[in-house]
Amino acid sequence: MLLLFLFNIVPMYGILIAFKDFIPSKGIWNSPWVGLQYFDFMMQLPDVWLVTKNTIIIAGLKILLGFPVPIIVALLLNEIGRSWFKRTVQTIVYLPNFLSWVILSGLILDVFAVNGGLVNSFLKFFSIEPIYFLGDNTYFRSIIISTDIWKNFGWGTVIYMAALTSIDPSLYESAIMDGASRWKQTLHITIPGIVPIIMLTAILSMGNILNAGFDQIFNLYNPLVMKTGDIIDTYVYRVAFNDANWSLSTMVGLIKSVVNSLLIVTGYWMAYKWTDYRVF
Amino acid sequence: MRKWDQTWGFRVFAIGNYLFLTAIALLCLLPLLNVLSVSLSSSYAANANLVKLWPVDFTLKSYQLIFSRKEIHDAFVISIERTVLGVLLNNILTVFMAYPLSKSGLRFRGRNIYMWTIIFVMLFNGGLVPTYILVKDLHLINTIWSLILPGAVPIFSVILMMNFFKQLPNEIEEAAFIDGASYWKSLLYVIIPLSMPVIATVTLFHFVAHWNDWFSGLLYMNDLKNYPLQTTLQTVLKGADIKSLEDAKNYSDVSSRTLRSAQIFVTTLPILILYPFLQKYFTKGIVLGSVKG
């Protein structure tokens, strides 16, 4: 019976994994070998360094600045006694997470629009000249980073809230017996209680340093902000589908993929080493 | 009431905390409300920037216009078709893949090979162009399958479900085996009914992923009439693309502002309707996925 089961399953994921991955040899089979030519070519392209720099800056800042926000919100929510308020806030901040970047970029384009966008109406109230946020190299990255944090902090908050509920309540009781204030309790019980999950999130987010968010940037950028907003993924897309330089695009994508995998493996290895977290 | 609840310091903190959290919640809600109001206002009011958080000159015109348009109607149908088919396939394959993998290496020889394949595939993928070429070579371009098949096995869900299967008590299945059940029977009548929470969770993951995906539509469909809803919306938004500063200034003057807002809202709607259920299960799913030994 086990054998039968095996034979039913094996071909199935054989095929499906191939869909995901083992493709590179297929259509390329008949094309001539060029060796590392495209690699050398890539290394000489100034654009490649620019997009790499942009990618690392945007992704790095997203990770760095986005990291504390959900922790702080979760801790503050934890101090709230009324559960309906807690639930409502949690539900609302979690909402943007479910919307695609297409929808959100529509929203963002509208909110930051030069004429009549919410932000510029607000600035006008203080008689500040309208600013074209999404077309200005000085603001573009800030918008990308802040909207990304805005979209994602709800998700993190839910994770930390879950971690908070798993702290043993008797710890608080004994702390109260010892006369610890609310602040002291937070400092000595709550925060140490979620440190493992904080560590874990930190380590695992390392693997994202080359992912600055294709969906988001592709939908928000425009030729005016290429200098600060173009990232590896959008570059790969443009080189492939606008310039039709498939080999170059694949090479850039491949390098990114390799570096990314290494980062993720290192991240998981560190997570296993320090926090004993295992996926498998 | 505990003692420190009475101190002034705490009260100030509590009030500040409520205010701060309310502000944060509003920050997440207001942009959506603004777009909704714009979509429900007359185009005159929208263009004159009179609309803030409440519709001005309430009208449903833009919605009527949107639903009377054939391409949006078609896109809606494609999106639904794709989501239903995709979620179904995702779920079936996830279960079929997670079940054998949840068995130990003794029961399922070759488990490690599959496991490593999965990990490898998860970490490392061929990239945009090779994937595109494959889909093209398989003649999937312009068919709904190009939207479904490349992501048919969601690895994250497989791992989530595998871990869930693993922590089910072994004895239940053993009892089924003693009663003469095969692996298939045990999976169908014992394991799956016990796994409804995790199945509900991954179903929602898959639903959101399929509904929100716009990129594969853009990539694999050559014809506008084959676009799913998100891709249609994307082209509409990008259609007002900004090539120069002059365009940028004009961008928000376009009289289609209400239309655009209405379309954003129509695309969001299914998620908003399902959101109450989504939220509950996602919270569960995240806990399942992250806080495990």
Image: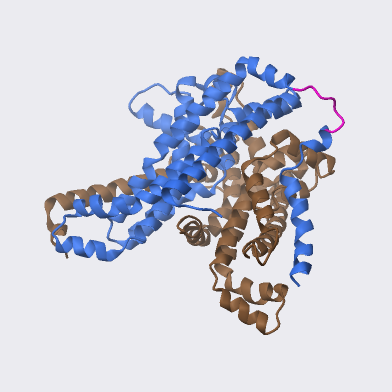
- Residue B157: % across, % down: 60, 56
The image quadrant of residue A91 is bottom left
Judging depth in this view, the residue of B29 and B255 nearest the camera is: B29
Whether residue B115 appears in this view of the structure is yes
Magenta stretch, overall SS: loop
- Residue B264: % across, % down: 58, 44
- Indicate the quadrant containing the N terminus of chain B: top left, top right, bottom left or bottom right: bottom left
- Residue B119: % across, % down: 62, 48
Whether residue B34 appears in this view of the structure is no
- Residue A206: % across, % down: 48, 38
The image quadrant of residue A233 is top right
Q: For the point 28% across and 56% down, which residue is it?
A: A80
Is residue A241 shown above or below B39? above
Q: Give the range drawn in magenta.
A: A29-35
Q: For the point 22% across and 50% down, which residue is it?
A: B15
Chain displayed in brown: B
Q: For the point 13% across and 61% down, which residue is it?
A: B3
Q: Color of chain A here?
A: blue
